[in-house]
Image (spheres, helix red, strand yellow):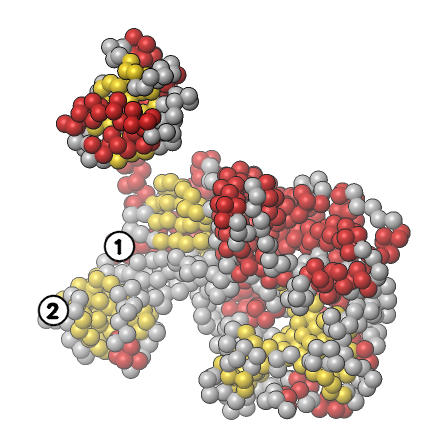
């Protein structure tokens, strides 16, 4: 018996007459009421047995099945919780997408730092898992987007202290009983249920878990999270690490809504059950029309589709061949029937995934969740093209967005269309790289590597099957791994470090790396923060608790402070600390583990009573800019759309910047619209209000957009209300919006794909910025001798005239080159006996003139060797098609004589060096060099 075996010896199993067995096919241990059962029930050990034979008394839609589940658990004293967004980084900073219902409560609730919104609770949580992308469409059961129905409890050991919840609600026996009872409420045959033992490990935690199988498909997973990683732990888990029991233990269940709906209907695949209208539309659009015989074969093959799981099957082609053998049909015939349908299923699922991601405000980009939505979008487009679906992709995504109830459907469609335009441009550029790579690998007689395939997809969006097509044309081969898109997604599933975190102030700049401060800080109490009590107050009194001498100055710790520590993109306050005998300058302020550190230029004296004075001008400018940041973000959402979210921010004294997610460039009109709305809010002079509500109350009332600048810890969070904007924020703010004075957007720019930067100034800084712009405009108007309002038209006229003048100059240079080539003083030199001639000449013109003249000479069937010595020695060599001389080799020899280098293709090359004095001698050697090159052929 293994270390965990006793974890599965449940009283409920014993009371209900379950028997523990070992699967004769895969060796897994499972529990069943059927003493004659020999297999665990999961593919490939068994086939789907509910297709055409629904597993419940009634057929349910998604909506009906969701309600059945939630109502069942509400009737059993669970509180229903509204689902969270699929963009998990809206409320946590360690993951990008919601992959399970438990993600809603990690890490604060599961760790016991914060109470759950209810205990026990039930929820149906939309989720997205990229690691299943290759299985979608093939197995009949996998979906990338799905709803995980769940009932959860959060428990602590009896002697545990310091947690946000206490005691036990229920544990394993009750969880399995609830599962049984829910199956029974739907009319399931309980003797067909199997409970497979499958311990769970993830994120440093672990616990026993049970997979619940019914008629060949997994419908639920019951996880009992109760362990944490510990090198001396009692339990060794399947990841090879040891674990020990935690003070907290949590019921984390997962019931797949789509699969429950599927089993209730008994359709060939889950896709017909989940979105039948879309499958029908796609089949008609792609012209997929099966005969009755073909339809019958598809239904029969669907019962074994579970064997096509890339995580289980050793080889996908062999797995399909096995299915073909089972039904005595040619494998190619089966593939011809199934692959178009599998593609249709994937398109429907991917469209739903896109609707979730775009509907929840994820903007396509090159990083993080933005990259993942782009990957799904491009793959969906390729699948649609492959199977012949002609309907626009934005229409397909909109069909799913409408079904899911999103109200931002116009924005979703606009994003899809914009992204497809970018994709086409990327493909044009990337195709050249693929051809080059194919030639390189063909020369090496090697298949293009998976690493190269992933890089091509990452950099250019080139699908692996497209690479294979191009490679074949150039004699190269490609081996595409079955899990290619899972490998790509794995590169982008971890969030990168964010630039700023508006909700946190627990950061250190100078303190970072000073680990020896830890010992001092650990003995000190948290500093009382006075700057939240009265943000306009600039003076205070305090006692010096400690002074730590450093190489670069002193670190002073007070019992309380008005100095704001750097955090949330807001710089630290500066000022002075004074006693009756001395005054020290405060140059920087940081927070570490709740203790605020003041970096000073001198020692005010430990135990001294000090008077603190904030640099009021600096603080007020920072307060104005911080509040203006909230206002600019709020205005940007009104102008650009609700998908706009903060991607970074930095507040300053003279200007600030706010980075926002957006799928296209901000236009001048949009920038002006944002500025107008922002200044309207300033003129309204509304109060800027702070409050400290319970986290769950705040989330329920305002949604997860409150976490624009990061996710604060704790049960209660600080909210800042500015007009209709509400954000969790730890910064300092003005009392009323009118205190800002005015806001001026100075510029906008794209800082990365999918992220726009808005640079602005507030208050006096806005006036200063405006005056600088006016001064520059007035000076320009004086130079042009026009009024300021006439500057744009005048500048445009001058620019067009300048371009025309440039074109005329280029034309004159070409004419001059022709004249030099045909009527110049240089003579043609015969360089061999078969009529090959060359023109060797020095004239000190720019390189463009040299190039034009050399080209004209070569067109007259003479080799051109031209030199110029304006600032350095420069050579241009042009060779006619019929002359067997390599221009690049000639230039290299000439350039070597003047201390430089050069090169180029055989017909045209240029180069040079610094030694102008050696130019003439080099040109004198040119005929000899040409003769030698010809003789060597």
Disc 1 to disc 2, how far (Cα)? 23 Å
Q: Which residue is located at x 69 percent, y 81 percent? A: 27
Q: Is residue 727 above or below residue 557?
A: above
Image location (x, y in percent) of residue 624: 34, 52
**Is residue 693 shown left or right of residue 848?**
right
- Which of the marked residues, 1 or 2, is nearer the chain's N terminus? 2
Q: Is residue 114 visible?
A: no
Q: Read off the residue under disc 2.
A: 582
- Of the numbered discs in the image, which one, if any, rests on residue 701? none
**Mark 2: which secondary structure?**
loop
**Is residue 430 shown left or right of residue 583?**
right
Image location (x, y in percent) of residue 671: 44, 39
Q: Read off the residue under disc 1.
A: 618
Image location (x, y in percent) of residue 816: 31, 12
Q: Is residue 904 above or below residue 449?
A: above
> Observer-nearest residue: 360 or 604?
360
> Observer-nearest residue: 474 or 444?
444
Q: Which residue is located at x 63 percent, y 46 percent? A: 382
> Observer-nearest residue: 631 or 324?
324
Q: Quadrant of the N terminus?
A: bottom right
């Amino acid at each position: 018996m293994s270390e965990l075996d006793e974890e599965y010896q449940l009283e409920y199993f014993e009371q209900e007459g379950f028997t523990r067995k070992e699967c004769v096919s895969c060796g897994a241990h499972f529990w069943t009421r059927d003493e004659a059962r020999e297999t665990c029930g999961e593919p490939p050990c068994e086939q789907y047995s509910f297709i055409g034979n629904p597993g419940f008394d009634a057929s349910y839609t998604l909506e009906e099945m969701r309600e059945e589940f939630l109502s069942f658990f509400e009737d059993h004293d669970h509180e229903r919780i509204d689902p969270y967004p699929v963009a998990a980084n809206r409320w946590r900073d360690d993951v990008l997408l919601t992959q399970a219902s438990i993600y809603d409560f990690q890490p604060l609730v599961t760790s016991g730092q914060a109470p759950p919104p209810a205990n026990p609770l039930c929820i149906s949580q939309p989720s997205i898992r990229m690691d299943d992308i290759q299985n979608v469409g093939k197995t009949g059961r996998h979906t990338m987007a799905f709803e995980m129905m769940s009932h959860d409890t959060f428990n602590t050991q009896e002697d545990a202290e310091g947690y946000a919840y206490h005691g036990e609600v229920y544990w394993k026996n009750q969880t399995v009983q609830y599962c049984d009872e829910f199956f029974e409420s739907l009319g399931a045959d309980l003797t067909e249920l199997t409970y497979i033992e499958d311990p769970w490990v993830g994120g440093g935690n672990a616990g026993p878990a049970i997979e619940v199988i019914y008629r060949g498909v997994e419908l639920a997973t019951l996880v009992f999270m109760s362990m944490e990683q510990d090198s001396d732990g009692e339990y060794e888990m399947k990841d090879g690490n040891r674990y020990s029991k935690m003070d907290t233990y949590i019921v984390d269940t997962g019931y797949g809504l789509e699969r429950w709906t599927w089993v209730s209907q008994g359709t060939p695949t889950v896709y017909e059950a989940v979105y039948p209208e879309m499958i029908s539309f796609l089949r008609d659009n792609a012209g997929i029309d099966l005969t009755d015989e073909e339809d019958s074969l598809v239904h029969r093959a669907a019962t074994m589709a579970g064997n096509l799981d890339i995580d289980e099957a050793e080889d996908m082609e062999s797995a399909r061949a096995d299915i073909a053998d089972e039904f005595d049909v040619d494998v190619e015939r089966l593939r011809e029937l199934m692959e178009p349908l599998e593609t249709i299923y994937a398109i429907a699922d991917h469209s739903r995934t896109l609707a979730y991601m775009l509907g929840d405000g994820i903007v396509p980009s090159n990083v993080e969740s933005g990259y993942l939505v782009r990957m799904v979008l491009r793959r969906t487009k390729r699948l649609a093209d492959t199977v012949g679906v002609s309907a626009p992709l934005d229409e397909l995504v909109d069909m799913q967005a409408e079904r899911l109830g999103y109200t931002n459907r116009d924005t979703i469609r606009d994003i899809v269309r914009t992204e497809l335009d970018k994709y086409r441009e990327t493909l044009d550029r990337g195709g050249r790289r693929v051809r080059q790579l194919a030639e390189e690998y063909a020369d090496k007689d090697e298949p293009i590597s998976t690493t190269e395939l992933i890089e091509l997809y990452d950099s250019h969006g080139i699908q692996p099957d497209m690479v294979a097509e191009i490679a074949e044309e150039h004699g190269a081969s490609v081996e595409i791994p079955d899990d290619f898109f899972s490998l790509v997604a794995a590169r982008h599933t971890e969030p990168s470090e964010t630039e700023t975190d508006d909700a946190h102030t627990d950061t250190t700049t100078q303190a970072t790396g000073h680990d020896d401060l830890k010992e001092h800080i650990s003995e000190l109490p948290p500093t009382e923060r006075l700057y939240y009590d009265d943000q306009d107050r600039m003076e205070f009194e305090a006692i010096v608790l400690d002074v730590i001498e450093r190489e670069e100055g002193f670190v002073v710790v007070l019992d309380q402070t008005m100095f704001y520590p750097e955090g949330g993109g807001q710089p630290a306050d500066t000022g002075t600390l004074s006693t009756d005998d001395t005054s020290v300058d405060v140059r920087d302020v940081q927070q570490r583990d709740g203790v605020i550190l003041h970096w000073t230029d001198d020692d005010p004296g430990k135990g001294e009573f000090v008077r603190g004075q904030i640099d009021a001008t600096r603080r007020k400018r920072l307060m104005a800019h911080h509040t203006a940041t909230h206002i600019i973000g709020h205005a940007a959402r009104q102008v650009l759309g609700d998908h706009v979210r903060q991607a970074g921010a930095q507040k300053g004294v003279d200007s600030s910047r706010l980075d926002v997610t957006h799928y296209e460039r901000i236009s001048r009109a949009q920038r002006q619209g944002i500025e107008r709305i922002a200044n309207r809010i300033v003129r309204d002079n509304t109060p800027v209000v702070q409050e400290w509500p319970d986290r769950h109350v705040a989330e329920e009332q305002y949604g997860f957009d409150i976490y624009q600048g990061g996710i604060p810890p704790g049960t209660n969070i600080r909210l800042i209300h500015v007009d209709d904007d509400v954000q969790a924020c730890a910064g300092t703010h003005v009392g009323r919006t009118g205190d800002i004075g005015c806001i001026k957007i100075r510029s906008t720019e794209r800082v990365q794909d999918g992220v726009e930067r808005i640079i602005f100034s507030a208050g006096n800084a806005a006036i200063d910025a405006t005056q600088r712009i006016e001064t520059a405009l007035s000076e320009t108007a004086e130079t042009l001798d026009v009024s300021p309002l006439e500057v744009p038209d005048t500048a445009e006229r001058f620019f067009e005239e300048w371009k025309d003048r440039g074109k005329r100059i280029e034309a004159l240079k070409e004419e001059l080159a022709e004249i030099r080539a045909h009527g110049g003083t240089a003579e043609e030199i015969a360089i061999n006996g078969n009529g090959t001639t060359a023109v060797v000449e020095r004239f000190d013109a720019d390189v463009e003139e040299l190039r034009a003249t050399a080209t004209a000479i070569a067109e007259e069937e003479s080799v051109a060797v031209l030199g110029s010595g304006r600032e350095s020695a420069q050579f241009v060599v042009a060779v006619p098609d019929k002359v067997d001389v390599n221009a690049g080799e000639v230039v290299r020899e000439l350039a070597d004589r003047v201390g430089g280098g050069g090169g180029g293709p055989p017909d045209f090359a240029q180069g040079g060096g610094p030694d102008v004095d050696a130019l003439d001698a080099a040109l004198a050697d040119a005929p000899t060099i040409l003769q030698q090159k010809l003789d060597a052929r």
